[in-house]
Image (tube, rainbow, N blue to C red):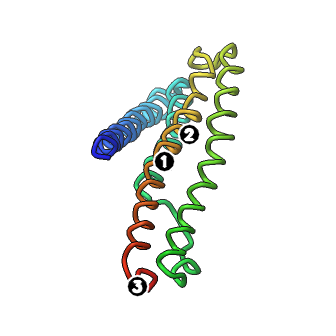
Amino acid sequence: MAVLETFKKYLDTFVAWVCIGIVGLMTVLITWQVITRYLFNSPSAVSEILSRYLFIWLILFGSAYVFGLREHMAISFIKEKFSPRVKIITDMFTELAIAVFTFTIMIIGGWYTVLRQMWQLDSALQIPMGYIYSAIPLSGGLIVFYFLYNEIHLFRRLNTLNSVPGGEE
């Protein structure tokens, strides 16, 4: 389990730095876009398109990162009324539903989309659109890893709760 903890820590750090790098690069690109548009009266198409794609990548990788930290949005009003055991089971089921969606839509569907779009070039960047779409299955893979990690921890909490007398309180 220590290996998994260490791997998650390094993965979290890596994904956080990727997101920070994307934000930094987007800041530079958008600043360049404003300068070229208003000072030189010649907008840069490359910086506009690239910043748009980077924003999408930021959303996908940031969402996976937040899911891994278990800090994603949740409506917990009803769940808070349950016993600790039911809360954990509800969390496990919710994460399972998210993982099934992620695996089928983001990983499998995203992979087929990447493969189908490798022949189509972006008009401004002149790179295959499959590279741009590759953020979908990559972030899906992160979410599935975080799901497995979170399920292990939830299962351990459930077992600890079941082994403690009066754990249902």
Element at label 1: helix
Give the image location of residue 111, x and y in percent: 64, 28
Of the image marks 3 and 2, the number of the one nearer the N terminus: 2
Give the image location of residue 65, x and y in percent: 43, 47
- Separation (CA) of disc 2 from disc 1: 12 Å
- Separation (CA) of disc 1 from disc 3: 28 Å
Observer-nearest of 40 and 136: 136
Nearer the viewer's eye, disc 3 or disc 2?
3
Of the image marks 1 and 3, the number of the one nearer the N terminus: 1
What residue appears at the point 45 percent right and 36 percent down from the top-left corner?
30
Residue 148's tag is 1
Instruction: Say whether residue 113 is left or right of residue 10.
Output: right
Of the image marks 2 and 1, the number of the one nearer the N terminus: 2
Q: Amino acid at mark 3?
A: Gly
Q: Amino acid at mark 2?
A: Gly
Element at label 3: loop
Instruction: Say whether residue 29 is left or right of residue 115.
Output: left
| Residue hosting label 2 | 140
